[in-house]
Amino acid sequence: MSAMSSLLIRGAGALFIAGFAAFSGAKAQEAFFKGKTITIICFSGPGGPYDTYSRLLSRHLSRYIEGNPQVIVKYLTGAGGLLAARNLAEAAPRDGTTIGSISRTMIYEPLIGANAAKIDYSKFGWLGSMAQSTAIYVSWRTSKVKTAQDLLEHEMLVAGTGAASETTIVSSALNGILGTRIKLINGYSGGPAAMLALEAGEVDGGFPTLEALKTDRPDWIGSGKINLLFQARQIANPELPGVPVASVLAKTDLQRQSLDFLFPRDVIGRPFITPPGLPPERLKILQDAFNATTRDRELLAEAASMQQPIKLTRGEELAAVVGEAYATPTSIVDYVKQFVPKEQ
């Protein structure tokens, strides 16, 4: 047998082995997920943006997983998302049958909050984010607060949704860092309830996202019903020309550095995670399925009809952003932490 023939035979054998391994992996994946149910645990109640994205994912994810498991959404609300995060960290199965939708601010709670649950978010598996998000401080048209600068002089009542919630953490930190006068009125169940409170005149300000406004209160934007004060982002969303980012109120380098830490890179958006300890090969299956789902034509059409933007951030990038946050200098973390409520 010639050397060339031997090389060809060995090459063909290698290709066969590789193909057989890929086939075996797919069959093993199908064997595991076939007949199973994947549960998406959503920390917020029905009607909010996190719920909207969770339901979008649940309706289309199965097509991209061998075995086509059923996918359902389960609500686990309370403590601003802490109950859901604790369930994912401690009780949820670590086999790929549980996915979590969590608030992007929860990722930073162990650094600047009490972290009573002792959760390390860097240990979760990161599937990705379906969209970036723009949180905005707004005031009702009758409020004395018309601009970001007005918040330094006039008190604004905002509905509070839990000690570990984004509204509470960010508002408390802004009051301490910048001297804003945001007063939280606690006891509201989540974003939709907070918007109802603003509409009813129970409070005169709020902290919704642009996505939530587009979906739930599209008539508020551009109608004069609300004042758009500032964006809780590092970089302004071009959809909101003339609405500054929070750093417009910063006067010192310490304030600016603290805001950069408080408002992580905007790619985090609406993150989906898996419990810690998921086998790497199972995490990869779910990450690939998540990525493919965000490109699905039916999902994109459905999202467009709901005015919900889809912009993928891969799980690997989210993990890197979380790593950056956990590497923030202790001096900055401690400075911000002193302003955040410790009760959980």
Image: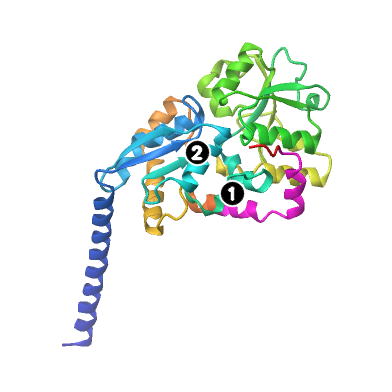
Q: What range of the chain is rendered magenta?
A: 320-340
User: On the image, numbered disc 1 is attached to which residue?
Assistant: 118
In the rendered view, does 72 fall on the left or right side of 275?
Answer: left
List x then y, in percent, for residue 234: 67, 41
How many numbered markers are drawn?
2
| Residue 71 visible (yes or no) | yes
Give the labeled residue for mark 2: 84
Task: Please identify the quarter of the rendering in which residue 248 is found.
Answer: top right
Q: Residue at x 29, y 42 (%)?
A: 69
Q: Is residue 241 magenta?
A: no
Residue at x 78% of width, y 27% of height: 181
Taking 64 as reference, is 11 above or below it?
below
Say above or below: 224 vs 55: above
Q: Position of residue 216 (x, y in %)?
A: 52, 20
Residue 151 placement (x, y as % from top left)? 78, 26
Q: Which label number is shown at residue 4? A: none
